[in-house]
Image: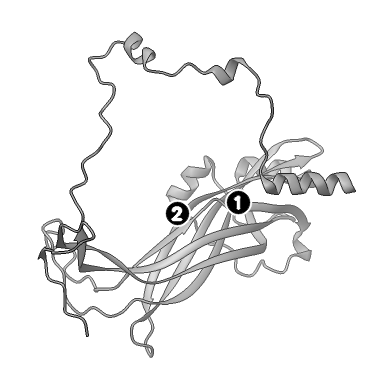
Amino acid sequence: MADRVLPGPLNDTASLREAVCIHTRKIFDSCRDKDCIEDLRVYPTIGSQQYISGAISVRPRSAELLCVKVDVDEVTFNRGYYTVDVRYFYKIKGIVFPCGGEICGLAVFDKRVMLFGSEGNAKVFTSEDNCLHCDKINQPIAVVEAVDPILLSLKLIDAGCCDNLDNELIEVPENIISMLGDGIVLGHTGRVLLATLGQFSIIRLERDTQLVIPVYNYCLPDKECVGGAEDDPCTLFGRIRFPVEEFFPPDKIETDDEYKALLETLNQE
């Protein structure tokens, strides 16, 4: 077994200066997911309900990830493992026909994953807590990274043809409703709005720990600070590069490989 590296100066040829102890979060386990969420119930806002009642069809416009609620629970019979329950809140927008009005609604998606988060029995207290969280369990911290989903489809169906009306939302947090700008209709009045989303996400479990890391040097910025309250507008304007490309059209426009392949496919058809 290799000797343990201790904090302090290092004699090494790789320009290492010393080894230092830092307090940070160590990732114990993580996973990535590519979810295709089909026929997800969308709860329209009060202002959008009137458009939905008289609409024949609906066209998708956009989907925005508003918030993610994360809960961590220990797995009883599997030491060191935890379930991570994730609830995604989405803001869905569409255009209804024939009136062409814009509608907006809330969609909620739940998922659960199981990850390894190790064990920690020590009670941690800091000056920031001021003993306000003395009964806090030393659990790992779940982190969810996600991008705005891709709105693949949006459709209107009769409530009698919908199979997922059993698990309807009972209440919605006030901060989510404020992001929508209007109250939402939790029940259904004959027409149900369903969305299909594509969601990319990364979920990981982290735990506070102390690590020994190599230090090459101090992080001294190379760039000088530019601008300040003492500079007049003309001085700041003088530092801006002249935008030549805005005045003269380019001789050619570079396209990425994926777009070129799409053009070739369309030309063949």
Alpha carbons under labels 1 and 2: distance apart: 14 Å
In the image shown, does 73 or 264 lie closer to the viewer?
264
Is residue 56 visible in the rendered structure shown here? no
Q: Position of residue 243 (x, y in %)?
A: 51, 18
Q: Residue at x 22, y 69 (%)?
A: 209
Mark 1 = which residue? 185
Report the amino acid beneath label 2: Pro
Which class describes the residues within 10 Å of circle 2: few (<14), some (14-19), or many (20+)? few
Up-down: is 218 above or below 238?
A: below
Badge nearest the viewer, 1 or 2: 2
Up-down: is 269 above or below 213?
A: above
Left or right: residue 255 compared with residue 207: right
Left or right: residue 43 compared with residue 141: right
Marks 1 and 2 close (CB-CB < 8 Å): no
Left or right: residue 75 compared with residue 209: right
Question: Which residue appears farthest toward the bottom when viewing the image?
Answer: 77
Q: Position of residue 149 (x, y in %)?
A: 59, 53
Is residue 255 visible in the rendered structure shown here? yes
Q: Position of residue 224 (x, y in %)?
A: 25, 29
Left or right: residue 67 compared with residue 232: right
Query: Of callouts 1 and 2, which one flags the residue occurring earlier in the amino acid sequence?
Result: 2
Q: Residue at x 47, y 49 (%)?
A: 176
In the image shown, does 107 or 152 lie closer to the viewer?
152
| SS of the residue under disc 2 | loop
Mark 2 = which residue? 173
Up-down: is 109 above or below 101?
A: below
Report the amino acid beneath label 1: Val
Residue 107 lies in quadrant: bottom right
Residue 77 lies in quadrant: bottom left
